[in-house]
Amino acid sequence: MSRLEFIVASAVLRLIGMVAALLPFHADRVVLATARVPVLEGNLLHIERAIRMLRPNLRISLLLEPYGYGLRAKVAYALRLLRGMLLVRTSRYVVVDNAYLPIHVAPHGSGTTVIQVWHAAGALKRFGVDTVRPLAEPEATFLHRYYDLVVTSGDASRGPWAAAFRTPIEHVLALGTPRTDALLDAAAMAAVRGSLLAAHPRLAGRTVVLYAPTFRGRGREKRVAGSLDARALRAALPEHYALVLKTHPNLDARAEATAGYDVVVEPTSELNDWFAVADILVTDYSSSIFEWALLRRPLVLLVDDLESYERDPGLYLDYRREMVGTQVVDTAGVAAAIQADDFDLAAYDDFIARHLGPCDGTASRRFVERLLTD
């Protein structure tokens, strides 16, 4: 967002906010908002389900407002934000999983509680306003302001998340990540596994290697990792291994080379669903590492650019000493790690205790019972 775009958008949204102050306030309304994807998923989906079960008296409004970088996408996004501002200013609870402009342009009323649940677990790569390279304007001014509470996955991430979200650490609560509940629900995982295998029968009976890297760069400059040569990996592994690619939902999937994969997953598909069929995860600096750890399955980290990633955006963990999994620097290393099958799964227990202690399968229930009072 340019400085001019921010000035115009914030002025209009503040005006809408003043109008909203004259409208009826809805003490029974919960707003679930995201600027990432056009569908309800992840933490917000699990919170929505828990609200319907535990607080059926609360009304739910959805703000699924993905941001775009083209002119048409920006205009459409701006128009949708007008409704978002009205709902934010007239609702008792607002739960977000990303930055959301109507929250950040000005303080909300005392009757509204804004809760940030973020879309990722743990504290791995530096993010928000706590990156090694400072944010540029106008993001440095407005991003991640005016949260009342922040909910994180465990005690180890409270400090980093307080810094990333400009929120006092006493307002950062380690209640667990709601989306991890499904990973610890054996029946739910079995159902998802059956559905995915029915849709992709070529995976049945094979050892599934899931490649799910995070992006590089920021904003409009986000790009694919480009570190794995899937064709070379396919040639190095026996046929009973199946290779699955899951690109990051914020990237153009067409930018990723797909040759060599048995299955290429839709970018908007839920990554945690694919954990139900995956036997080995190959990633890099993705926060999915935390959620994968809960399953105690083999992990390969392809981190050929570790030193540069430590410089920008920076990491909260020392990958060389604190990270689980097997670290490699090229495709040959990935193949060797998979075939050696010598993964230290015993290290996961301490890792989970530090970063995911409250992720016990009841995080969604805990969120609703603790924070959304009648």
Image: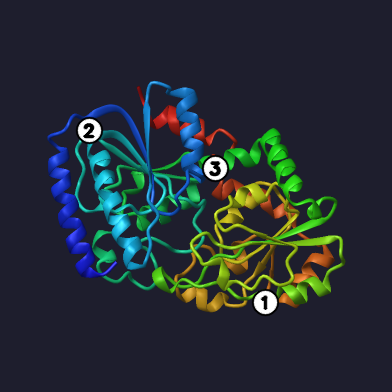
Q: In the rendered image, which residue does mark 1 sit on?
A: 329
- Of the image marks 2 and 3, the number of the one nearer the N terminus: 2
Percent position (x, y) of residue 363? 52, 36
**Toward the viewer: 128 or 76?**
76
Discs 3, 1 touching: Cβ within 8 Å: no
Q: At x 50% / y 34%, what residue is drawn?
A: 364
Q: Specify the quadrant that holds the C terminus.
A: top left
Residue drawn at x 46%, y 34% is 48
* Amino acid type assigned to the residue bearing label 3 in the image: Arg
Q: Secondary structure at mark 2?
A: loop
Q: Earlier in the sequence, mark 3 or mark 1?
A: 3
Q: CA distance from mark 3 to mark 1?
A: 30 Å
Judge left or right: residue 155 versus residue 111.
right
For label 2, the crowd category at 10 Å Cα-Cα, with few meaning under 14, some 14 to 19 and many 20 or more, is some
- Looking at numbered disc 2 in the image, what kind of residue is underneath it? Gly
**How many numbered badges does the structure rendering display?**
3
Identify the residue under disc 2.
Answer: 111
Q: Is residue 372 left or right of residue 1?
A: right
